[in-house]
Image (cartoon, rainbow, N blue to C red):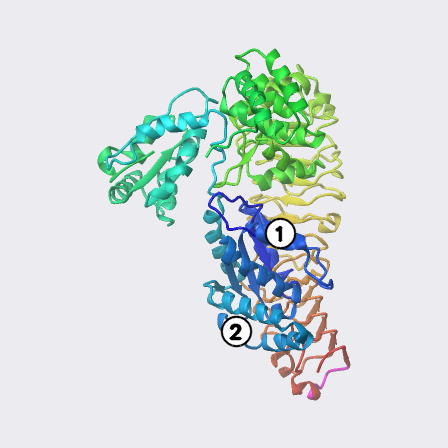
Amino acid sequence: MSQASSSKTFKYDVFLSFRGEDTRRTFVSHLYNALEQKGIHTFKDDERLETGKSISGELLKAIEEARFAVVIFSRSYASSRWCLEELSHIIKCKNELEQIVIPVFYDVSPSDVRHQNPPFAKSFSKHEKKYRDDIEKVQRWRDAFAEAGKISGYHLQNFKDEAECIKKLVDDIFPKSLQVISPFPESLVGMQSQVEKVTSLLDMESNDVRSIGIWGMGGIGKTELASVLYQRYRHRFEADCFLGDVGTLYQRNGLTWLAQVVIRKLLGEKMTLTSEHEGMIILKNMLRWKKVLFILDDVNHREQLEYLVGGKEWFAGMLLEEKTPKEDFMELSRQVVEYAGGLPLALKVLGSSVYGRNKGLWRDIIDRLKEIPNDDILGKLKIGLDGLKKDEMRIFLDIASLYNDRPVYYVEQILKSCGIHMVGISRLIEKSLLSISSYFCNFKMHNLIREMGENVLREEYKNSRIWLPKEVHDLFAGKLKTKKVESLRIPKGYRFGDYHVNHSKVFKKMERLQVLILDNQTICSESIITCLPSSLRWIEWPDYPSSSLPEGFDPSHLVGLCLYRSRLVELWPIRKKLSNLQHLDLRDSLELTRTPNFGDMPVLETLNLWHSLYWTLQYAYFFEFVCVKLKKLPKFVAMESLETLFLDECTSLEEFPEICGDMPRLSKLSVGSPSIRSLPPSLGALNFMKLRGGEVLESIPDASRNLESLYIEGCNKLATLPNSVFESQQLEDLSIIQCSGLVEIPTSLGVQKKLYRLAIYNVRT
């Protein structure tokens, strides 16, 4: 390994080191998901079998290619030779590559790690016996343990729960994970001379305030130039801030919100402002006493500049290695620059297309550039689409037309519902056709690239995607070919009833329609909805106006159904099978009176019934979920009549649903998820409890005093049973099967007067 430099790039933001049997399905799973949702690229080894003779070279390479290493110390971490080798290599990367190591002390203390106290002492003793001919290896492991234990980290006992610890950890990593590398490298041809010109204007040796404005048409490289300057000089300042898309953010969120973002970037603190005036005062005071580098990109209104920057008196001071191509490619590089018109965006896209390719491909692209008129920027950008596979092209066109500036997680759900593989996204990013914003984790596409994509749609995929108001009007007016439509986004403010057409008849003809999205405040009367095409995979229709979905609609292909704020009373008056439904969102549907039949949704993963079914659920007496992929249930709010709750088949459930209020009649409970760690204390009325496969369940509520039947199977973390289970003398049936962690059963079991069935198998006691 070579010494790290400030210019080192990383394949991963975070490498996770953990003991699989302790934390893989609990803490590590939640942490990994939280990191990925923030756009923090994380390596988690899900496939290894710790039975090999040596740790794989690929795993060691992954450690070296990560900016951060998060080590989760659990009780059996030291029992794994793989974990010890990982840790040893991580500490080596810390010392030689300046890798940042973040320890998490899960169910152990930092002192235990530092000194290899129990529970680690026994494991190290075994290693010393096993490797008595290679005692240096064990000592290296001990040294790594000792050094890791001295690093300030996250001790789980200092947090209210795991969720709080994970949130704090992710919030701390996120701002540091943004690579200190300009997304527009100085190696972009022609950039160096522009950087030097602006640098001379900055007069870096002066203590005066310097304000530089960069103005010009889109695509000429203003943002690229500012980014290079920012990355080159930010280290010279006490605080720095690069705020992009100012115009868009201002229009969407206002000046007060912008001020909060700037304050967080400059101070690293979250602050809630009550007024624009308060934000201006804080910014003025903060900038006056600091040496600050402050760059605002895409400012389109004078008010934005005056509010965020003010006058010179605000500031103590303000400031707003190129590699040479190989000799035999130098002339080809010059020709590409010439025929691309010197536009940085075109150069970036074209450069991504030819990087690492042979001279033949270079010459082919140059020949094609010669045929494109000098003023045809979009034509030059279109060459960047060469070589895209079918799925990659579809993703590009979908984002260009329908999903630009939309959250990554949201877009991926829709694309997956249409059977599109997500690997294509990384290919688009590699080709500089797409990026992901670090702050919002949204897909971002440059205006010129998006315009180029829209042109491709009109020329080569006409009417496949409809999203512009005029096109939507023409579609329902019968002026467009409906059979070609695959995705339809109806824009905000569109009125279905304005054009006196039979919308249901038009919908019926859309035989290939897969995605139907209505933006908020689309106006539609109940009489409009009598038919929907059965080809639909994703429906997003806020304020849906009918009491149920059309009876003739076949939902067998449906993957996502989002009808929030709807007027639904029920999904259908008849039973329908939703074999592929994964996402159901009926929140704020205040007129909903019947729950869907969850037995007809075998692959349901997400469910949102917030502020729906309130009165119905209050008086429900039986509730059963049979959704094996469902990870989270809505809150149970004051369901005073509920008597039976069966969650046997919800094997992916990550936590027991939150209970708000009393459930005095809940007498029967059955749970079958391996990830549930605890049960709520408000279960005092239970007389029947079945807990199956609770691999991390650590305790049973002490309030379970009325139990008549208790069945526990596969709960290996359960160490004891509460005395309250036996105190009331109500127990009639007790089964404890394969609970290897159970070390004690209350002696009062022996005096149970009503106990007629006792089954205990594979228990340590």
Q: What whole-number distance in Å separates the C-alpha atoms at marks 2 and 1? A: 29 Å
How many numbered marks appear?
2
Q: Is residue 546 above or below residue 100?
A: above
Mark 1 lies on a secondary structure that is helix
Amino acid, disc 1 = Lys
- What is the magenta segment's predominant secondary structure? loop
Where does residue 160 sit, x and y in percent of width and height?
A: 48, 64
Give the magenta-colored segment's residue range.
751-756
Between 492 and 512, the one nearer to me in the picture: 512
Q: How crowded is mark 2: few (under 14 residues within 10 Å), some or many (20 or more)?
A: some
Nearer-N-terminus badge (2/1)? 1
Q: Is residue 189 magenta?
A: no
Residue 669 quadrant: bottom right
Where does residue 192 sit, x and y in percent of width and height?
A: 43, 28
- Residue that carries the numbered disc 2 in the rendered image: 112
Mark 2 lies on a secondary structure that is helix
Q: In this view, does 737 lie above or below 437?
A: below
- Residue that carries the numbered disc 1 in the rendered image: 61
Residue 399 quadrant: top right
Q: Residue, x 49% and y 33% (percent of image)?
A: 185
Residue 157 in view in this figure: yes
Amino acid, disc 2 = Asp
Q: In this view, does 417 lie above or below 453?
A: below
Q: Residue, x 46% and y 53% (percent of image)?
A: 172
Q: Residue, x 70% and y 79% (percent of image)?
A: 731
Where does residue 698 sit, x and y in percent of width and height?
A: 62, 71
Left or right: 290 as drawn, with respect to 140: left
> Which residue extends farthest left?
313
Where does residue 533 sit, x and y in percent of width and height?
A: 73, 30
Q: How crowded is mark 1: few (under 14 residues within 10 Å), some or many (20 or more)?
A: few
Left or right: 554 as drawn, with respect to 660: right
